[in-house]
Image (tube, rainbow, N blue to C red):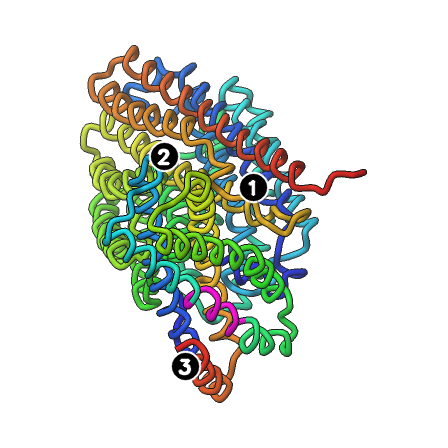
Amino acid sequence: MLMQTQTGSLLHQDHMATIESLQNLEEFLGRQRGAPVLDETVKAFLAALGGTLRQEVEKHFGFEENHLFPEFTRRGETGIVMMLTMEHRTILPLALRVADLADAAVAAGAFGEQDWRDFKDAGVELVEREIFHIQKEEMGLLAAISALVDGDTDVRLAQVYRETVG
Amino acid sequence: MVPGMLMMGAKDRLLPPSVPFRFFASAVVLHVAGWGAVLLGADTLPGFQGGLGPALAGLHLITLGVLGMTAMGAAFQMLPVATRRQLGPLWACRLTWWLYTPGVVVLSLGMGAEHVGAMHAGGWLTVAGLSLFGVLVGRNLLQVSDLPGVTRHAWIALASLLGLAVLGLLLVSDVGVGFLDRRGAVAAAHAVLAGYGFMGNLALGFSYVLVPMFVLSQGVPDAVGRQSATLSAVALVLAVAGLVLGQGMVAVAGGVVGLVAIGLHLRALLAVLESRMRKRLEPFFRLVRLAWILLPVSVVLGMAVAVGGAPELSAPLWGWLLVFGWLLTFVTGILQRIMPFLASMHSGGASGRPVLMSKLVAERPLAVHAVCHGAALALGVVGLMAGSVPVIRAAAALGLVGALAFALSAFLVLSRLIAQERAAQPSKA
């Protein structure tokens, strides 16, 4: 994992936060035999999960697609952009689906049976796809940023990241 | 595997899956054949210090057929990705397989059947395949100035490959002629260069890329890779020179330096595991961790062989722990992870959604393989120490069952991939 760039370092921190959320989700799903009772702890977890997924996945992907990937495209590296963008197209709807189901369950005070099955299926798939995606970004994208992005562009991208993602 | 980089200049560097998978599939098949040959030659294993027959054939089916084959497939896929430089034309990668695979099969058959002509033909074909591999990898490494931790180990592996090929051809040519005065010492040097020099250094170098990626952790600092590579080179020179010149203590000094290199390597990888983001370690790490334990144990036994300590016991035990213990355990652990990984990477053409790895991996056959492999290793050690043919035979039988289970898991990866890809294709009206 190469993080000589500010942008790479910021993306890495975001990945760490996402991995932690995904692992919490994985452990939560693994503990449940059926639809869980939504006590205050579970509600707090689900509420945080919905917010975290939107923040980490939607904004993170938005930064990459709108600001970082164009730099790669300008340098002729379209392959990595195509691959990661296609994965975003698969992962983002899954993440939003999990977040929506979590929010709905918190609002209703319980999971319906079908909603719980959907939440579990989408959650399991999200964990696997997003972790595989992060593996690729950690080992490939961050190194590619180091190799392709010059110092001035790195500073500018990092500033944009702080403004748009937080 | 640095998948993101796979797509940087993808047309130049992303190999079609048929290239690495032909090597991996061959390794899986020869894994079964190797354990089968060991089973056939089990009665010669107590006190084994060389000699033609099924045991030697089994040893080479495992070393060349499984370890070398996997190393080639992995190197062809990984090096252009990790170094971001082209490796060579596709036809040359394919030609390597066409030379090497029949070479290994014919050489092993020749060893098993004690047929000198087959050994010569197989040996030369094998060396031709290895040479082409060496040229392709060398050309790639010449273009690389970064990644010194990985590339230095790869250079040592290539230098060792040259040495082991020369010594291997000498050993084959010596059969029935007897011009080598110290054939046992040359065979031991050949084994050191093959097990620690070629395969060992590829394993060490590639681990610096693969392990951090699998567990999502910080990479190993280049300085550590440079140090472990330098120490490995010194260790190999001392060990080989000591063995060939009959200076046991020099070889032992090489073993000590090698242990320091291994210590640095393992300490770095344990730090990688400590700082990992992914808490759950996948099942293949059971085998990788066992291999990490057996690597230094094999070096210590090798030092006993170097000073001539009870060779009828120490030599076969050393060979067992080096080849079946450290290397085969490590390689089957990595292979069971990278096959579904690559299959998933190459999937999704029709739908744009790569097949989930969890849909490809067959957990049960892999668990059977892990249990059988571990039991085979342990029983083999007991059998060799006790000089018991039935126990060694039981070990080989367990190894064979494990290899069959491993082959089933590999078959299921491919069949599930095909089924998933077909299911994802839009139906024709």
Which is more toward the observer, B427 or B278? B427
Q: Residue furthest front?
A: A108
In this figure, which residue is indicated by the disc labeled 1? Answer: B127
Mark 2 or mark 1: which is in front?
2
Q: Are marks 1 and 3 on the same chain?
A: no
Which of the two marks, 2 or 3, is nearer to us in this view?
Answer: 3
Which residue is at the front of the view, B148 or A142? A142
Could you say where residue B234 lies in the image, as x and y percent from the top left?
31, 57
Quarter-of-image position of residue B63: top left
A56 magenta-colored: yes
For this view, does B426 lie left or right of residue B414? right
Extent of the magenta region: A55-64
Residue B165, visible in the rendered structure: no
Q: Residues within 10 Å of mark 3 (few under 14, many from 20)?
A: few
Name the chain letter of the residue that bears numbered label 2.
B
Tag 1: residue type? Answer: Val
Q: What secondary structure is marked by label 2?
A: helix
Q: Position of residue B4 (x, y in %)?
A: 52, 61
Residue B32 in the figure: left or right of residue B296 = right
Q: Residue at x 39, y 53 (%)?
A: A102
Between the C-alphas of marks 2 and 1, the distance is: 20 Å
* Label 1 chain ID: B
The image shows residue B298 at horizontal and vertical percentages of 26, 38
Q: Which residue is mark 3?
A: A162
Observer-nearest residue: B311 or A29? A29
Q: Which mark is residue B323?
A: 2
Which corner quadrant of the image does residue B107 belong to?
top right
Q: Going from the N terminus, do you reach mark 2 or mark 1 first?
A: 1
